[in-house]
Amino acid sequence: MSSKKNSSNSNFYKEPGPKLSKESPFESMMERFRFAADILKLDEGMFQYLASPVKQVIVSVPIVMDNGEIKVFEGYRVIHDNVLGPSKGGLRFAPDVNLEEVKALAAWMTWKCAVVNVPFGGAKGGVRCNPKELSKTELERLTRRYTANMLDVFGPDRDIPAPDMNTNEQVMAWIMDTYSMNAKRTETAVVTGKPIILGGSQGRKEATGRGVVTVTLAALNKMGLMPNKTKVVVQGFGNVGSVSAQLMYEQGAKIIAVSDISGGYYNADGLDIPKMIEYSQNNDNSLEGFESAEKITNEELLELECDVLIPAAKEDQISKENAHKIKAKIIAEGANGPVTASADSILEQNGVMVIPDILANAGGVTVSYFEWVQDRQGYFWTEERVNRRLNRMMRNAFDNLYSVSEEYGITLRQAAYVYAINRVVTTLKLRGIYA
Ligand code: NAD
């Protein structure tokens, strides 16, 4: 058989969801939803409405493999809500994708879009497969057949997929082409995260890290701290971490430590971030062997004395085991779910401001929205315009959540859910329930 290829591409913005408890992902999302619903005193009918996805689609996806055999995969698309506009959310290819997970992640997208005020509902999709075992041609056939089966679901005014786990801009290009062939016209706005030449947006690669930095600067401002007087620590040096480190560095902040899977790199006088990015790019995306810094462990890195800590690697990094050792004043969650629920209350007691993932890393979905707008206009913005509008939307979103957290005396994470649910409910009440 021809060489197998994994379709993932980390150097890219995505619309990934958080990692959810394997037992019942939908339930763990619902816990947060219930807390916010109580604060908002949602009535039972409204609660039921928001707890029930609008549409759940399961399709079988048969393809002819390179060796001539037929194999059948299972594909899903869940639209959780479309009250604010067409639904939006990533498509993942993974061996353990299932309907419960997709349902939970679709709901999470509803709240995430509402937090940053983009006019989208929430959706998620997946195909249960192991992309590492598929050749590029098999992956293309899988993507095209899945798309063909979803022609009545997808559409620029209905439901718009984006990259997520193990899907990338090539997969988005195949979806766009399959949809366009069937529509008998080129329809670029049916997916986001496309290559720029096919209607993708400028500024998308840095969008998530840029958003992290915008909300971090807004938080520093609330605390009366000057960016150029702050000490910053960044965990993870991939797409989100390296861009966040670079942009904080450009603000004059002292980046005293960064890390990747090879460990932590510390310099009390501040690291040369552009040099580290260049080193990592020339070293197979790894900082292994970087010399102008003291080597520390990832655990030590999290506990350093600093103003801002940006966990941008993976989930569950700050838990009840180490939360009391965190000395940062602000934690900006670049990654999805880096702070566990049990750590939340410890950090709150210690006065650490946590900017939740649902806001902090929403820069990607915001630039997805810009991509959709540009595709529909057929007019493409400069990178400078994309960045300016992204900064404005992220800044406004932070200010909104900050006001809600003050009004109810709750954390920014709780405020995010309260704000998002309130936005959907207010819109729904105005639209009314179609009889
Ligand atoms: P990436 O693969 O580009 O980078 C991950 C980085 O973390 C790498 O430097 C890797 O070496 C490092 N890492 C992995 N395990 C580590 C560990 N145990 N300790 C320290 N470093 C470790 O990924 P990314 O796209 O930057 O995403 C990072 C996180 O942000 C993920 O949680 C992802 O879901 C989330 N996120 C990403 C985007 C996006 O647009 N890329 C959008 C929203 C959320």
Image: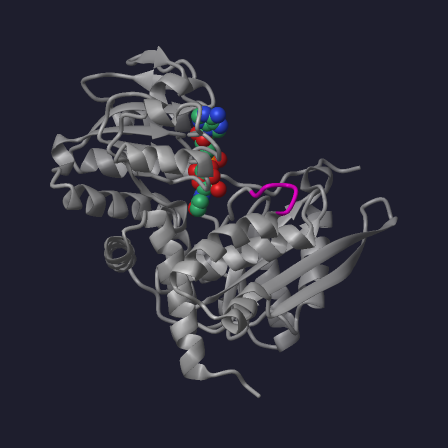
Q: Can you tell which quarter of the image residue 370 is in?
A: bottom left
Q: Where does residue 139 sit, x and y in percent of width and height? A: 69, 49
Is residue 347 shown left or right of residue 429? Answer: left
> Is any part of residue 431 visible from this angle?
yes
The residue nearer to you, when weighing 230 against 188, is 230
The residue nearer to you, when weighing 318 against 58, is 318
The residue nearer to you, when weighing 417 against 215, is 417
The residue nearer to you, when weighing 118 against 68, is 118
Magenta-colored span: 20-24
Residue under the point 60% across and 52% down: 26
Q: In which quarter of the image is the C terminus?
A: bottom right
Colour option used:
one colour
Q: In this view, does 432 lie above or below 294?
A: below
Is residue 410 shown left or right of residue 64? Answer: left
The rendered magenta stretch, by its main secondary structure, is classed as loop
Q: In which quarter of the image is the N terminus?
A: top right
> Is any part of residue 194 visible from this angle?
no
Q: Where does residue 217 sit, x and y in percent of width and height? A: 21, 44
- Tell which residue pokes out farthest to the right in this image: 69
Q: In this view, does 166 lie above or below 38?
A: above
Residue under the point 23% across and 36% down: 248
Q: Where does residue 197 sit, x and y in percent of width and height? A: 45, 58
Residue under the point 32% across and 47% down: 411
**Residue 334 highlighted magenta (yes or no):** no
Is residue 323 shown left or right of residue 394? Answer: right
Q: Where does residue 19 sit, x and y in percent of width and height? A: 54, 42
Q: How many labels does the image show?
A: 0
